[in-house]
Amino acid sequence: MTRRVLFVSPAMNATLRQARFDDGAALDASGRAAARAAAGALVTGVGALAVTSGSRRCRETAEALGLDASAAPDGLAAQDMGRWRGRTLAEVTGAEPLDVARWLDDPEFAPGGGESVAGVCARVAWWLDALADDAQVVAVVEPEVVRAAVVHALGAPVSAFWRCDVAPLTATGLSGRGARWNVRLGGPLSPADPSD
């Protein structure tokens, strides 16, 4: 049996526009409209379990996509940014430039006293590997969770985490058997073009 996981990143909101570490902000009007418009483009397997991480933007994206999603397990939670939560990258860089550089360079470094990139990658890998052989999951999760899943699926080093860009409202699919995963790289969730 093949396990399938479709990771969906949240739609746009003010936090993303400001390069701010999640502060619990809602989707903005354009993000909500884009997610509603994309609802018909999201193709899920029959009987797929829909889950969403705890952030407001993920929950609202799942709702706008028409998913009846339950809370995602802890393995799919957003990275804990500690005291950086709610601050912009520019603010943190101005106040703690050495820590920002270390966060981007050292996967074991826990930013703001939170969780390291290596920690995120380890728990996402554990969650993926613990899935039942016939699991079908749609998960609306933060971009760092998608990055961690791709790193694990490809067997890449944790340092590859920052080499994965995850745009808002995109889907990245993983399918696998046993310890092997295949990756279907993210594409935008947008209504089909009638001219296609």
Image (cartoon, grey):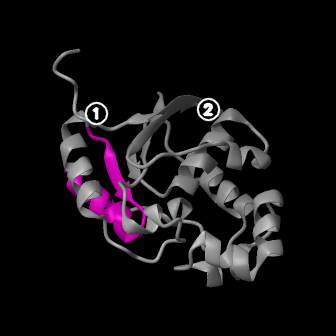
Residue 93 appears in the rendering: yes
* Residue 59 lies in the magenta stretch: yes
Residue extending furthest top? Answer: 196
| Quadrant (top left, top right, bottom left, bottom right) of the C terminus | top left
Q: Residue at x 35, y 70 (%)?
A: 56
Q: In the rendered image, which quarter is residue 14 located in?
A: bottom left
Q: CA distance from mark 1 to mark 2?
A: 24 Å
To which quarter of the image does residue 40 belong? top left
Could you classify mark 2 by the number of other residues whose Cα lies within 10 Å: few (under 14), some (14-19), or many (20 or more)?
Answer: few
The residue lying at 73 percent from left, 36 percent from top is: 155
Measured from the top left, where is residue 68 in percent x and y? 22, 55
Q: Position of residue 49 (x, y in %)?
A: 33, 48
**Is residue 164 shown in magenta?**
no
Query: In this view of the protein, can residue 69 be seen by the observer?
Result: no
Q: Nearer the viewer, residue 24 or 123?
A: 24
State the image coordinates of residue 193 (x, y, percent, origin top left): 21, 24
Question: Closer to the camera: disc 1 or disc 2?
Answer: 1
Q: Classify residue 75 as left or right of residue 156.
A: left
User: Quick one: SS at disc 1?
Assistant: loop
Q: As displayed, is residue 161 above or below residue 80?
A: above
Q: Secondary structure at mark 2?
A: loop
Q: Which residue is more in the foreground, 11 or 146?
A: 11
Circle 1 is placed at which residue position?
43
Circle 2: residue type: Gly
Q: Are marks 1 and 2 in contact (CB under 8 Å)?
A: no
Region in magenta: 47-70
The residue at the point 50 percent across, 36 percent down is: 133
Three-letter amino acid code of the residue under disc 1? Val
**Nearer to me, 174 or 11:** 11
Residue at mark 2: 178
Q: Residue at x 63, y 42 (%)?
A: 164
